Structure formats: structure tokens, C-alpha cells
Amino acid sequence: MGTGQNRYRNQFSQINERIHTDRRKIINSIYSMSSVLKWEQHVDTCVEMFLKRMGDIADGIENAVDKCVIDREKLPKEERASREDIVGRFFQIHQEKGEKLDFTIDDIKTEVHIAFQAGSDTTSAALTAILYYLMKTLSVYTRLVAEIDEATASSQLSQPRIRFNEATKLPFLVACVKEAMRVHPSVAFLMPRYVPNGGAQVSGEYLSEGTKIGVNPGVILHDKSVFGSDADRYNPDRWFSSDAENMEKHMFQASRPSLASPYCSILED
């Protein structure tokens, strides 16, 4: 595909090697290292602009957290915890057990901050994986649409928004969600554990008690001894096998330590 009405294809889509070479020769010198170094000040400007925008976003999150908590704190005491949402539950704990548990307003802000950042990131990653594999795998997409259409026709689903308890009764939908989150887990950092008293043997190595160890969720969720020889392949049908219960245990073990509530993430997905 060309750019606008240009008679030549762009450098990425040009398949004629001779034309590609001739067109590159015209502009090659512009992208030489000696030329690029002359523009270093402009690169610095872009980097500074990027860092400023990232700082603005971070400040925006901090301000949103502060406003969320301060606005709730301004309400009469009996109303702060009356609203049925996560912030209301935080205030309920603070009002009823705050002194005993050392759970202050600052602790509420910390928890709200986690909900703002961690919750949005993991949920967006999961949704991206779910939609990606559905679009990539036509047979799975077609089968899922048929399941949803059948449930809709039989009035099993609320309109205009499906409820969580209704969605979980669609077995193939649940399998598609689990499989996408397995193949592409929402977090990619180590899940820390501490070796218990007496030490432990891990992969043939002795580790003394108190040693901090971890494993990437992607390693756990692609373990062929747990998920089968095709563990690297997207296959929702694996969740209908006799090993589903054991696989489920490994799914939650890979996510539980990192999520304030894996259930919130599942509900949002």
C-alpha cells in the first residue's frame, strides 16, 4: 500500500528489490549516524516531552486518588461507608476497626491507588488477549457466537448488559476467557515465595529456609506436565478435559499473590 497517491510504494511495502534500492539511495544519507547525531537535541526534546507526559499521567492518578478519598471523607460519618463500593468498604473497615488494625486514611489512599493502577492494567491485558485469540481463531469465534446466540434466544441473558452469574453459565465463553488468560497471563513478573522451615529441594537444588524464590506466571501456565503437550497452543477445549480442576489450581496460584483481588479482575473480564 502506498502513501496517498504516490506512484511508489512506501519503503516497507515495496516488493520490487531494484526500486526499493533506488528509492532508498535517495534518502540514505539522511539516516546515517553522523546525520542523526546532529539531531540529538531534538531527540532530547522528545524524551523530555515524553517524561513530562508520563509525569502528568502519574500526577493525574495521584490527584484522582486523593479526590476520591477526600470527597468521601467530607461526607457525614454515617454516609462514608454507606455506599456499596470498594471505597465504602475501605471506610467501613477504617471506621469500625481502624484503630485496632492500624488502618488509616493514608492506607485507604494506598488501596485506592492500587485499584486504579493494578486493576486497570491487568484487566486491559486480559481483555486484549481474549479478543486477540478470538479474532485469530475463527473456529473458536464462530462457536462462541453460536453459544451466545443460543443463550440469548432462550432468554438466559439480561439485556442490555449480561450479568456475571449469567456469563459464567456459558461454558465455552468461560473456557475462552480462561485459555486466553493462560496463554497470555496479565502479569509477567516473578511470584515470590519464601522457602519454609527446614529448607526445600527445588529442581534438584537445595534452598535454605527463608530464601526468596519465584517463577514467572508464563512458565507455570505453559507447563506441559500440567496443561498438556499442546500447552503452547490456544485451545479452549482443554478446559473440558478431566484435568481441568488441576489446571484451575495452577491458574490461581499464578495470579493470587499479585492481585489485590483476582475475583475483581475476573468479574471485569
Image (cartoon, grey):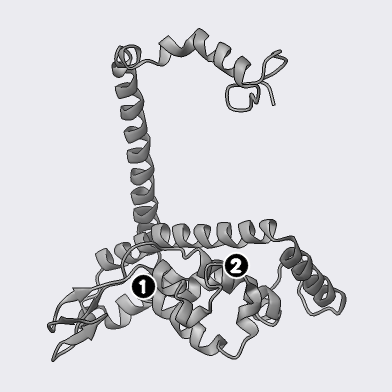
Left or right of 205? Residue 245 is right
Observer-nearest residue: 210 or 86?
A: 210
The residue closer to the viewer here, 118 or 33, is: 33
Numbered mark located on residue 234 in the image:
2
Q: Position of residue 206 (x, y in %)?
A: 16, 82
Q: Is residue 178 visible?
A: yes
Residue 243 x, y percent position in the rendering: 55, 88
- In the rendering, at what x and y percent does residue 246 appear? 49, 88
In this picture, residue 206 sits left or right of residue 144: left
Give the secondary structure at mark 1: helix
Circle 1 is placed at which residue position? 91
Asked which quadrant contains residue 81, the reply is bottom left
Please name the residue shown 53% across and 89% down the image: 245
The residue depicted at 68 percent of the width and 73 percent of the height is 173
* Residue nearer the viewer, 237 or 119: 237
Taking the view exactly as shown, the residue that stands out farthest to the front is 18
For label 1, count other residues whose C-alpha is less than 10 Å away and answer few (under 14), some (14-19) or many (20+).
many
Amino acid type, mark 2 = Tyr
Q: Residue at x 77, y 70 (%)?
A: 143
Q: Residue furthest right?
A: 153
Q: Residues within 10 Å of mark 2 (few under 14, many from 20)?
A: some
**Three-letter code for the amino acid on which mark 1 is drawn:** Phe
Cα separation, mark 2 vs mark 1, equals 42 Å
Q: Is residue 78 visible?
A: no
Comparing 12 with 181, the one in front is: 12
Q: Quadrant of residue 157?
A: bottom right
Q: Position of residue 107 (x, y in %)?
A: 27, 67
Q: Earlier in the sequence, mark 2 or mark 1?
A: 1
Q: Secondary structure at mark 2?
A: loop
Image quadrant for the N terminus?
top right
Q: Which mark is residue 217?
A: none
Frontmost of labels 2 and 1 is 2
